[in-house]
Amino acid sequence: MHRLMRTGIAVVAALTAVAAPVGGRQAQAPAGLSAQERAMADFVDANADQAIALLERVVNINSGTQNLEGVRRVGDVFRAELDGLGFQTEWVDGSSWGRAGHLVARHPADGPKLLLIGHLDTVFEPDSPFQRFERVDANTAKGPGVIDMKGGDVIILQALKALQSAGLLEAMNVTVVFTGDEEAPGRPLARARAALVEAAKGAAAAIGFEDGDGHPDHGVIARRGTTSWRLTVTGTPGHSSQVFSEELGAGAIYEAARILDAFRQRLAGEDHLTFNPGVILGGTSMDFDAVQSRGEAFGKTNVIAERTLVAGDLRALSVEQFERAQQTMREIVAASLPRTSAEIAFDEGYPPLAPTDGNRRLLSMLDQASRDLGLNPVTAVDPDRAGAADVSFVAGQVPMIIDAAGLKGTGGHTVDETADLPVLAIQAKRAAVLLARLHTGG
Ligand SMILES: [Zn+2]
């Protein structure tokens, strides 16, 4: 549920790559690290091959969101790893929201609670041709979910193992949530995300390990929320020769056109706000299959249209912006042309992650950790290029939130999903140092 603007980002990434070695692979002496932090970085380097082997193992287990058993099997692998690190692990069954469920792992201790978020599922179901981890060359591998986001899940484990190796994990208060339905969340959403929201209670910081825009030196401090809407319009049928007459009015298709154009005129161009009608059906009668997002319509050129349906989406950066846009859309819908009526319904959607000072502070801590490791600076990606993801569900509840701390590459949600493998160690080091500093408040 992200990497929406892949093409634009690829250009940005390519330009940046010319300007600076991506991911900080140039040899630089780690400067501002403590002895423990240096030991963690060494641990990550020494265990890079094991981490990639674990990634290969989980990528080779199909866990398309609807493959409930596969999602659970990937969860079992990570559960065993977290058990080995001394976490209390729990599988939260997802049958009440129609999905596999979630893995929740707690490592309670004194000190600030740190929440780490991943997901077990991918968009590639068992009938996809894309099923296996495949090494392309020394530094790249293809595979379903390799960056979105089994790579991020492995980075979480690698950072925790590094913290344990340095003797730090024991005293840390860490909760890990791997959801089982990020790519196609179950409904009702509130139930499907209750375990995540519960796990976030009292957390000082939350970090998502999605792939973000794919750039190794980008983090996410804001994501737009997204919801879908459905507009249904009813007109008064009759002979087309009498359209716009007092008795018959404008008909359902003219009314739908008025509404959509008013959306565009009133709301287009507002920063961070987009809305897009994706499918429209209209005529005398029609039949829309919401699951397949397809349908049929019947009408005659000499009959005024009786029904029109439009389905679209709406994206905004804050709850307030969502509410304002929805209010405007409702007002437009209510101002019906003669002899027509219309209704708009908004689905429950992904909430926005607004850019807060806390989120900025957490990203600057990650950036500092990266520089101290001798790696590239980390900067925030444009929120308009960051799609919705699970961190958004803890927005407003956790004072500091970032995302895109995961494995990077290209082609997410396509059969060309490719990981830049050296980024795995880079991100694990950054995360380990950041978590150690969050624990001590440093
Ligand atoms: Zn993802």
Image: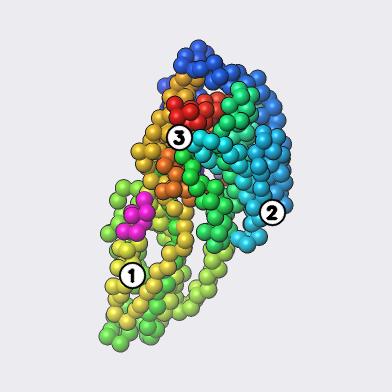
User: Measured from the top left, where is residue 82 in percent x and y?
Assistant: 67, 37
Q: CA distance from mark 1 to mark 2?
A: 40 Å
- Residue at numbered disc 3: 219
- Which sits in the foreground, 427 or 387? 427
User: Counting residues from the N terminus, which is met first, the one under dot 1 or under dot 3?
Assistant: 3
- Residue at numbered disc 1: 333
- Which sits in the foreground, 12 or 93? 93
Q: Amino acid at mark 2?
A: Leu
Q: Is residue 329 magenta?
A: no
Q: Amino acid at mark 1?
A: Val
Judged by depth in the image, the label closer to the viewer, 1 or 2, is 2
User: Counting residues from the N terminus, which is met first, the one under dot 1 or under dot 2?
Assistant: 2
User: Measured from the top left, where is residue 307 in percent x and y?
Assistant: 43, 76
Q: Tell me where the magenta segment starts and ends, as one range.
A: 318-324
* Residue 200 seen anywhere in this rendered image of the structure: yes
The correct choice, above or below, for 44 with respect to 179 in the image is: above
Judged by depth in the image, the label closer to the viewer, 1 or 3, is 3
User: Measured from the top left, where is residue 419 in percent x and y?
Assistant: 59, 33
